[in-house]
């Protein structure tokens, strides 16, 4: 019996993109829906993720898996025949999980703050934290090709959706990735050479247009 | 295995350090505890060297190699010493367990913190939110003995550790979790009977006194 996979997503979400990259890495076919995030949430989303009511949700043969890094690990475990995303060695796995946790709790939290148009102070604080956490990640990357070493892996996948936001960050907040974190920029370009990444990430200009639209809608 | 191979950089009152100690005991592993001498003051050189990013306990040093963040550490312990397992065997059930691990990490300790950090109406709201979260967890537990099903698992370890602060929340907020969530309270009792928990869980009164000291320190009396 063929697997039925549905991804509940919203195109701007970097978390949804993580799942798409993982599915592409494994060569898995799936159907994606565009959920309404700010208006009425769909009955399917509310049924599949009653606790958080958030995307992404991966529905595998009718059964939901929620939280992006959790979904990625699930995909890695079920489709373990190709492109392993997590290392097999327990110590290396623990390091990958530590850095993925860092990307979620420091970096993406800081990104959220930089998008707080209402609060200039919070936006500035967010920008500072974003730069700091990217520099820490640069240190961790060192001279390796990927955070996973010689091949693309869990931490690379967790971080790379940020790339779609570089244009918006530069235009809206003056944060230039090339000047501040050149190693991260070259790592991003390396990741984008992979088809699974290039075809899964949205056009940065479209992200910017979307942000402008939302700013206008809320009167900024 | 000699004691010196597993070291935990520890703090007696930290529920996050408690997770690691329970996990090690469940696996029957011997370890050395190194208590951070100054709880809220100067951090030891070993801690700063082992966890330069967050500079926090717990840190597990296994053959000298550091692992940080309590949930990462407990998963490492489970990966490295598979028996008895902390996670189910099917990928779907593992995903459900990880979902609840994430919920526990994001919600419980902060909600409890809001209780002892506030007063009056704000505290009433904080207690209400906290009870909602515990009720959600009670629902997640269902009719099972443990979050791990028949066996004590990852989420039982993570959550029972956080309950070591519940007595303090109850005393400051003048409420009892048992009145609102009897099934959850029964689960706490069940877990507390395990030697891996009873041997390491701190005295609830001492935790209360510690939190009282924190309140004084932050001018929150």
Image: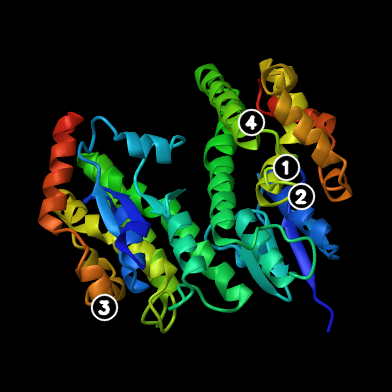
Number of other residues with Cα within 10 Å of mark 2, as a class: few under 14, some 14 to 19, many 20 or more: some
Q: Chain of mark 2?
A: A
Q: Secondary structure at mark 2?
A: loop
Same chain for the residues under marks 2 and 4 in the image? yes
How far is the residue under mark 2 from the one under mark 4?
17 Å
> Reading the chain from its start, which is encountered first: label 1 or label 4?
4
Instruction: Tell me the colour scheme of the image.
Output: rainbow
Marks 3, 2: nearer the viewer: 2
Question: Residue A59 occupies which quadrant of the picture?
Answer: bottom right
Q: Secondary structure at mark 4?
A: helix
How far is the residue under mark 1 from the one under mark 4?
11 Å
Q: Which residue is mark 1?
A: A146
- Which of the labelled discs sits on residue A138, or is there none? 4
**Count of all numbered marks drawn on residues in the image:** 4
- Which of the labelled discs sits on residue B190, or is there none? 3
In the depicted view, which residue is nearer to us: A163 or B83?
B83
Kindly indicate whether the residue at mark 1 contacts the one at mark 3 (C-beta within 8 angstroms): no
Marks 4, 3: nearer the viewer: 4
Residue at image x 71%, y 75%?
A62
- Which of the labelled discs sits on residue A151, or is there none? 2
Number of other residues with Cα within 10 Å of mark 3, as a class: few under 14, some 14 to 19, many 20 or more: few
Residue B201 spot, x, y in % from top left: 21, 62
Marks 3, 1: nearer the viewer: 1
Q: Chain of mark 4?
A: A
> Reading the chain from its start, which is encountered first: label 2 or label 4?
4
Q: Secondary structure at mark 1?
A: loop
């Amino acid at each position: 019996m063929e697997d039925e996979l549905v991804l509940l997503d919203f195109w701007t979400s970097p978390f949804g993109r993580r799942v798409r990259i993982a599915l592409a890495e494994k060569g898995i076919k799936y159907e994606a829906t565009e959920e309404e995030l700010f208006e009425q949430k769909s009955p399917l989303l509310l049924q599949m993720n009653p606790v958080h009511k958030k995307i992404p949700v991966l529905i595998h043969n009718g059964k939901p898996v929620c939280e992006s890094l959790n979904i990625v690990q699930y995909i890695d475990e079920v489709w373990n025949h190709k492109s392993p995303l997590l290392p097999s060695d327990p110590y290396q796995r623990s390091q990958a999980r530590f850095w993925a946790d860092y990307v979620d709790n420091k970096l993406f939290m800081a990104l959220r703050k930089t998008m707080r148009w209402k609060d200039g102070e919070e936006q500035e604080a967010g920008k500072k934290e974003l730069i700091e956490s990217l520099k820490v990640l640069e240190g961790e990357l060192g001279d390796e090709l990927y955070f996973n070493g010689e091949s693309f892996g869990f931490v690379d996948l967790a971080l790379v959706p940020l790339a779609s936001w570089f244009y918006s960050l530069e235009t809206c907040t003056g944060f230039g990735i090339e000047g501040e974190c050149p190693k991260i920029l070259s790592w991003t370009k390396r990741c984008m050479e992979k088809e699974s990444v290039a075809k899964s990430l949205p056009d940065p200009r479209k992200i910017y247009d979307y942000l402008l639209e939302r700013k206008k809608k809320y009167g900024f | 295995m000699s004691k010196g191979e597993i070291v935990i950089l520890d703090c007696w009152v930290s529920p996050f350090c408690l997770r690691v100690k329970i996990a090690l005991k469940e696996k029957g592993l011997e370890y050395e505890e190194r208590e951070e001498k100054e709880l809220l003051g100067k951090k030891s050189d070993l801690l700063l060297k082992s966890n330069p990013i967050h500079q926090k306990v717990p840190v597990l040093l296994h053959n000298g190699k550091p692992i940080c963040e309590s949930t990462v550490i407990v998963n490492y312990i489970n990966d490295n010493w598979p028996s008895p397992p902390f996670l189910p065997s099917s990928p779907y059930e593992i995903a459900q367990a990880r979902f609840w691990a994430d919920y526990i990490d994001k919600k419980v300790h902060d909600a409890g913190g809001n209780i002892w950090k506030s007063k009056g109406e704000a505290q009433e709201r904080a207690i209400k939110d906290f009870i909602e979260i515990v009720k959600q967890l009670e629902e997640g537990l269902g009719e099972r003995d443990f979050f791990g099903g028949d066996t004590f698992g990852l989420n039982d370890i993570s959550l029972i550790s956080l309950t070591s602060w519940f007595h303090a929340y109850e005393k400051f907020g003048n409420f009892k979790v048992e009145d609102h969530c009897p099934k959850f309270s029964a689960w706490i009792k069940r877990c507390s009977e395990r030697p891996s928990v009873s041997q390491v869980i701190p005295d609830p009164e001492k935790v209360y006194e510690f939190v009282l000291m924190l309140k004084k320190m932050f001018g929150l009396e």
